[in-house]
Each structure stands twice: as structure tokens, then as C-alpha cells.
Amino acid sequence: MHKSALIGYIFGTLLLNSICVNAQTKKDSEEKKSITKKAFQEGLKLISTTPNDTIVNIQSTDPFIEHSGKIIRYIFIERIGFEKSIYDSTKKVKKTVTNIANALHSNTREKIIYQHLFLHQHEPVNPAKLSDNERFLRDLDFILDSRIVIIPVAGTDSVDLTVITRDVFSLGGSLGGSLPSAPKISVFDANVSGRGQRIEYTAHINQERTPTVGHALYYRKSSAFGSFANIELGFTQLNTGRSYGEENEYAIFTRINRPLVSPYSRLAGGFEISRNWSENVFNDPDSVFIKYRYSVFDTWFGYNLGIHRKIADRKRLFLAVRYFNGSYQDQPEQAEYLEERLYNDLYGTLTEFTFYKQDYFKTRYVFGFGRTEDVPYGISLAVSSGYFREVAIERPYTGIKFNYSWASKKGNFYKLTVQSGAYYRNKEAEDAVLQVGAAYYTRVWNMNRYKLRSYISSSYTNIFNRKVSEPLHLNKNFIPGFNTDDLDANSRTATHVESTLFTPWMLLGFRFAPFVSADIVHLKCLSCGQIDKTFLGISSGLRTRNENLIFGTMELKATYVPSNAFGEPEFIFSFKQNVRIKNTGTFVRAPSLIRYN
């Protein structure tokens, strides 16, 4: 063949191939665009509500059941922008607001979404695994909501997945402390540059401090390198780390935590290293200031058994081990503190074996104002054993924890908890604790555009043969704003009743929910000569939240206590920012002792 003809033939072949490749690429691009457009519209309808939406609880696996076993061909990522309202899919947000939000906010990058996926191409569809991943994305503090939409591939047994996410506006802040004399100001970005990174700075300005301004800096990376492990680094002068003593503490800490993201995952674990020391920032006399320094090393590792069972079988066994060492380099100089549990070394190892089976319902208006909420239901039984040394006393420990919860499609939720643990020494149980708790959430009552949900929870705690552990107290966790440490009890019964009205009221994107509640706490008080004491708190208030913002729920509450610790009536007013209430639970946690205060 002539040289020029050969060159022409090669050139023509390359040109033809290029045209074919470009045509195929264009075809693939158009196919992807068609798939994601269809999925996007479907995802928007699922994420958004309407002013008159009716609550329907569905099992989280329901949307995926019909595609079970089909092969995943492609996984696409699509995001819903700020121009769409989650409260009404037909309503558009004002362009000015959208432009400001987009200018200040960086959308979560596709790469970061992929790093939070435990789904893979070319594997069969597992409905439970898909619903776990959807929920896992929703639990990220920089994601408002997520849906995974399945689009069948015509003429095959394959499907395409499109992951639809909606960011929250990641910039935020809070104002607290004592206003106006000693404000505490925090600013943060929960999704720096759209990379799943949180940076938070806090300053406490107080003329009574030395120095006047105290600082805290915190950093977190979510699912570093796609490992599902979260890395946290922090420095604080504001007692905001892991603190044990009663003085203002400085701390430097590092944490890594990898949760069990799904029953189909194998490993979970984490560790924390911190150095903590008290600083006399309020210039107390040396005889009064409690000077101390300690370090903490806390690590655990867990292995999930049974991940290769049949798709529909969610029963699992989880074996975990934890090691904890909190050691004092400097103890307080005052003799009265040398025997206190707070200021002595604590060493311990704990092994926990857990049987669990957990699924989820998807619903709305449990604690949120319209966002999708995941309500866990199922059963877990954990048996633990270990060995601890505290206040120079060495003892073995055993414990058992039982949890059962159920959520009906009508919208009623039930929870039951029974747990008990004890140390053993000299052939008897010491610092034994028994705790029983139950909760019931009513279905949502639709009243035109208003929605009402109520719940009641109750717990009973009893400690026996107390040697080292703290007595039972009554604090603001039980009755808002109420705190008394001079009542040392060995038994406590606490009941909380609350009704919340979710309204259609909206102002600048904030929705409102007034509520009323009552708290009754009964203590059997050892320091009062075995006298029984009952305290009552009646509260009313207003919660508000803009689900598009990173801010948690804000709560304004007034509480009336007919008889406080001194037998006098009292009104207590409180305001909380960034109240974070979520019903979603993890499948398993690090081995732990039973906590009751």
C-alpha cells in the first residue's frame, strides 16, 4: 500500500473511532442525565413535605424491596440546592436568600458523599443495606436529608442508584454564658469547603477571669479517606473537654471513632487521648483552689459476627473489648479530696457480648419540624464483665443490659430498658445498680395544618451497698433549672410527660412548636434519715428551628416548682440553643458501665 494511502487509512480509522467514542460518550451522558433527572424529581418529592402533609410511617426498606437481588450498575450523586424549600416542593426560596446562601456555603463535594457510601457497583441490591446508608447520610450534621432512588435498567436485571442529598447551611454560631457581663460566643463551619470538616472556635469573655478571654478550638473530619472513622482534635481553656474535677479545666485531646455504620459492617472501635489540668482562672486563694493534673487513655475495639447471613436476617452478635486508664500526675493538696473518687486513678478493662436485631421506620414530627426522622425498633441484649481499680480498690464487675423498642405503622412508638450491674468484693456485691425505664410516644394527631404528638417516659433507679460510686442526685436533667446536690438518695423514680404542637407558623424559615410538660421525681433520701421526697416541675415553652440551618433547636421554657429543696415555690426561666434531639440510635456502642446521674 502506498505510504500516503496508509497514512490516510490510519487517520480515517482514528477519526471514525473518535466519532464513535464521542457518540457513545454523548449517549452515555444523555442516559445519565435522563436517569438522574428522573431520580432527582423522585428524591425531591420524598424529601419535601407540604403544609398539609399527612404522616405515614413506613419501614425504611419498603422502597427497595421490589429490587432486591438486582445488580447495581452505576451510582450517581445529585444535590438539592437552597433554591428549593423542604417544606413545600412547589415553593421556591427567594432568589436573594438563595444567592446569599450559595455565596457563603460550599456544597458537599461528590467525593465526600462517596466516602460515606458503603454501597458498591456490581453488587446485588440489599434493601436493608441501602436503607442503612440512607439513614447514615441523614445523620451527618452537614446533611439535612437524603434519599437513594433506584431506576431499573430496561431489558436487564440491573439498576442504577442515584443518591439525593440536601445540605444544611453549614455556617453557624451560638451565644451563651452570662449576658451581658460574661458572654460565651461560638462560631463554626460544619462543612468547610464541602469536605466534611468541622472547625469551631469558642471565646468566653469574663472580666473575673485571668486571662479575661478563654479560648477553645475544635476540629473534626468525618469518614477520613472513606474509612467511616471520624477524627477529632481539640484544645480548650473552657472546661469543654472530657472533665472530671470541679475546677475550670484546660485540655488537649485527640479522638478517633469508627461507628458500626450497618449490621453488614465488620469492625467498629475508637480511642481517645487527652491531657487535662485545672487552672486558677478565677484567682481563688491557694487554700481553696483544687490544683490537679491527669491524663486519659480510652480505647475500644469491636467485631461484628453474622454479616453474611441471608439478606432478610438482621440478627447479629457483636463482641467488644474496652481499656480505660485515667491517671493523676498531680493530685489535690487538700487532704479532704485525696479519698474522693474524682481525684484518684481509675483503671479498667471491660468485655461486652451483644445480641441485637434492629430496623427503622421513617416518619416525621417526632422531634423535628418536618424533616425525615428515623425511629429505631428491635431488641438488644448485652452481657459485660471486667475488672476495675478506683480509689485503690480492685474489683471485678458484671452487668447486663436489655433494650426493646417497637414502632407501629400507625405512628405509636414504645421503648423498654432494663439494666443491672455490680462490683464484687469480699464475697458480696458492691455499688450494685438496677435501672428500669419505659417510654411511649403517641401517633401524630393531624388537626388541619397543626400536628400534635405526646409522650410519657418513666425510669426507676436503685443502688445497693454503695461503697465508691456516687449517690443518686436530682439535677436539671430531671426538672429544668432545678439542682440540689445535698440530697443523697439510694432510689429515684422520674416521670416526664410532654405534648408538642407542631404549627404551620413560619418566620424567615423558622418553624415553631409550643409545648407543655410535667416532671415528677421521687427520691428516697439517705442523708434525710430515710425520708421520702417528691418534687414536681410544670413547664411550658416554645421551640423553634430552621431545618435548613446547622443550628439546633432553640428552646425558651418557663418552669414552676411548687416546692424546691427549701420547701419554697420557685419560677425558673431557661433558654437553650443548639438543642440536638434525635431519635436515631446506633446499632452498638463501646462497652460501658451503667450510668445513672
Image (cartoon, rainbow, N blue to C red):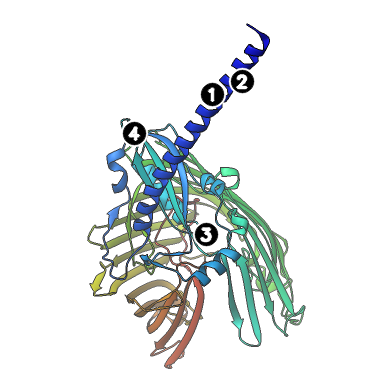
Residue 40, position as x, y percentages in the image: 40, 51
Inter-mark Cα distance, 2 to 4: 43 Å
Residue 531 position within the rendered picture, expressed as x and y whole percent measured from the top left: 39, 82
User: Which residue is denoted by mark 3 in the rendering?
Assistant: 142
The residue carrying mark 4 is 70
- Work out whether mark 3 precedes mark 2 in sequence or the reverse, and give the earlier one: 2
Q: Amino acid at mark 4?
A: Lys
3 vs 2, front mark: 2
Residue 344, position as x, y percentages in the image? 65, 62
Foreground: 65 or 525?
Answer: 65
Q: Gap in Å between the C-alphas at discs 1 and 2?
A: 9 Å
Q: Sequence order check: which comes first, mark 2 or mark 4? A: 2
Secondary structure under tag 2 reads helix
Mark 2 lies on residue: 11
| Residue that mark 1 sits on | 16
Q: Nearer the viewer, residue 145 or 302?
A: 145
